[in-house]
Amino acid sequence: MSFKLREYVEPNFNDSKFLNAPNAQLVKAPKDHVAPENYHAMSIYPEYFKIDGKWLLAKQSRMDCVAIYKNDEIHVLEFRNIKKDDLVVCGRTENCEEGIYLHTNGFNETSEDKDVFAFRMNRSRETAFSRDYDEFYELLKHEKQHGKIVWVLGPAVSFDHDSKYAFSKLIDNGYVHAMLAGNALATHDLEGSYLSTALGQDIYTQESIPNGHYHHLDTINRVKYHDDIKTFIEKENISDGIIYSLEKNNIPYVLAGSIRDDGPLPIVIADVYQAQEKMREQIKDATTVVCMATTLHSIAVGNMTPSYRIDKYGRIRQVYFYCIDISEFTANKLADRGSLSAKSIITNAQDFVVHVAKGLNIY
């Protein structure tokens, strides 16, 4: 099996509805952080706006944000980034009536006709995911050379020796271009590399160690003693693990803070909006996003990831979005983004990582 991106098909701008459409209404923002009445909220799909007779695509998009016209381009901003007098696109129709067009099927994803009644239409624990795995391997091979793969990890991936090793091999072999996570993932991964436990349990046998509940705190404390993770790795002779491999390969990672955090590690970003901005820096050019075993981070990243991207060659291409979770609710919530490019795989994230590394012949 060889992977091939779907070709993007632009709207037919010679169609009468485009030719006869009015220009989009641009209204000045009344004050900082406030959009004018009847503002247009963005979606995950490509959206075009008619400005001075020309249809302009929002090149960088995000759902639940607003479209701003500036310097002859459409910019998409969160409400908190609106400045007084920004020209905001207004209108709540999406089929050219107000100079706004939402292009939902640019990648020809329309499903084939299906029976009204059929078994196993939803994805669940009983779904066979063999084909999904095969497609995922080919996608990763393609994206390693031609895209950007961003992984969003929950701490469960770091609780097991084999999954830690498998994800490290993904990093070492070029299948991870950025990682987004929280304090817990990094803390327990470093704990495993430093003390061979995660939350006080042996990462291989899963046996609880006496006073093991101190281990994650001891790890954070020791990292703080060394001021940063890089120095901790060097001084404490850390030689394995997810964070070790990210540091060794100079792969960017963002750790966003939470009100639940212990410590946290020095690198964790406590300001939620600063963390969001740093996450967006990695997501804005991502072409494949894989979320594993983290409901809150997955939802956050899902909300900031559109279904398309302008690649380095100037082409509009699809963004592939995966959610891997043992919880059907979490995985299917993220898959329900209105795009067939978003897929859920219901499985243990630790097993998934090992399976993928073996499927790519790097384990």
Image: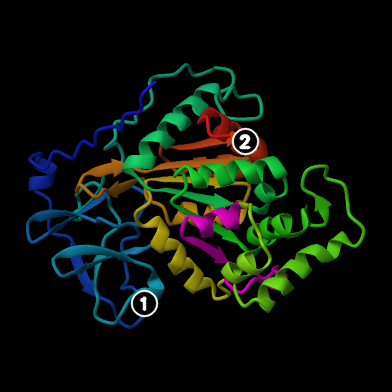
> Front-most of 54 and 163?
163
Q: Answer yes or no: do the residues labelled 2 and 1 have beta carbons within 8 Å?
A: no
Q: Secondary structure at mark 2?
A: helix
Instruction: Report the residue marked by disc 2.
Output: 354
Q: Which residue is mark 1?
A: 34
Residue drawn at 29 percent across, 36 percent down: 105
Real-space Cα separation, disc 2 to disc 1, in angstroms = 47 Å
Residue 184 locus on image (x, y percent): 67, 61
Identity, as a three-letter code, of the amino acid under mark 2: Val
Q: Nearer the viewer, residue 356 or 18?
A: 356
Q: Amino acid at mark 1?
A: Val
Split into 4 quadrants, where in the image is the N terminus? top left
Where does the image place residue 131, in percent across and percent down from the top left?
Answer: 50, 22
The image quarter containing residue 54 is: bottom left
Residue 256 is one of the magenta-drawn residues: yes
Q: Which residues are magenta?
A: 242-267
